[in-house]
Amino acid sequence: MKDVAALARVGTKTVSRVINAEPNVSAATAERVWSAVRALDYHVDLQAGSLRRASGRTRTLGLLLSSIDNPFASAISRAVEDAALPREVSVFASSLDDDAQREEAAVGAFLRRRVDGLILTTMSRSAAYLLPTIQRGTPVVFVDREPVGIDADVVTSDNRAGARRAARHLAAHGHRRIVALIDRLDIQTATERRDGFVEGLTSADSVRATIIDGLHDSEGAERALGELLAGEDPPTAVFGGQNLITVGALRALRARGLQRSVALVGFDDVPLGDLLEPGVTVIRQHPQRIGAIAADRVFARIDGDDSAPVRIVVPTELIARGSGEIIAPR
């Protein structure tokens, strides 16, 4: 705070009044203070210092994931919590909702609470805003998506290879009219899965692939697939680019009684997918493993590991349950 006061040419009490939105501070003075705060990357310590331990640690982690209500994200969260519990470390979890502004706001909130480390799913075009945080010694580990503009530990699934496997699986069962339902392309994993899907069909003869992107929930996927199924030349197979999209595809197929005649492979597992008839064939990710590895990395960094950043790719696997094995009609 003293550095902020010096740069803004005010007293520390004025800095405190500005930060806490107290009255009797002119707009010009407040602007100088906030400019100094931004220039110095200053974060208010909501733990008030007295709650910090002699080691300087707070025994807390910040965890930012796509959406905590998504089974994939919640599995990562649980794995991180399980790793943190024996260390008596608390985990502050928040949802990104695939919004870059929300990401930076959540990260700022974590840092104001002086977390010992961050595990993040990123949406920002550049994660370089975190460079000062890393330089100050706060470890950052990315999960699910690789950051741009920064060199840090990353734990991801092999999205491209998984989607490539799904496309080849459908083509191998005779399908030549295949639709891929893909998430928003500003999301890194969606682009990787689209590209992997396209690659998987390059060696298949006479395949006509339709790619519909920009889908982000089950309702949009259900509408998009429903329109194609009602067309003159409907697809005989569907690739769902993420679990919510797969749920929407299932609803569209079942609403028309096509679940046993149109093949479906989803990326990432869906709840109760093994109990449906036919069961849902999926490219399974391993979010628990991703979360556990990410937690190991962040705790290693907290404990002093200063080795070069690592990129860890967790393989996916195809789980055949019936929907993806439907043979194309003659």
Image (spheres, rainbow, N blue to C red):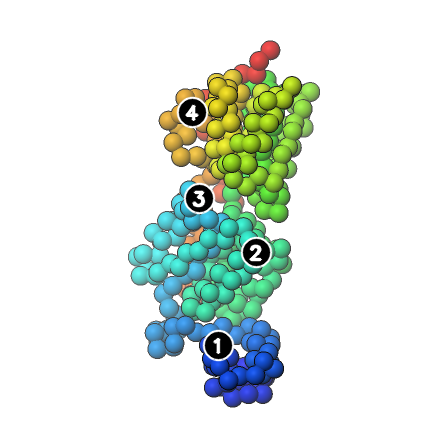
Q: Residue 279: which numbered mark, if any?
A: 4
Q: Relative to 14, say whether 96 is above or below.
A: above
Mark 4 or mark 3, which is nearer to you? 3
Q: Which residue is mark 2?
A: 100
Image quadrant containing the C terminus:
top right
Q: Which residue is mark 1?
A: 21
Residue at left 43%, top 60%? 62
Q: Position of residue 140 (x, y in %)?
A: 50, 60
**Crowdedness of circle 3 by 10 Å Cα count: few (<14), some, many (20+)?**
few
N-term-proximal mark, 4 vs 3: 3
Q: Nearer the viewer, residue 26 or 87?
A: 26
Q: Position of residue 52 (x, y in %)?
A: 36, 74
Tag 1 secondary structure: loop
Mark 2 or mark 4, which is nearer to you? 2
Quadrant of res 275:
top left
Tag 4 secondary structure: loop
Q: Relative to 72, say whether 25 is above or below.
A: below
Q: Which residue is mark 3?
A: 70
Q: Are marks 2 and 3 in contact (CB under 8 Å)?
A: no
Mark 3 or mark 1, which is nearer to you? 1
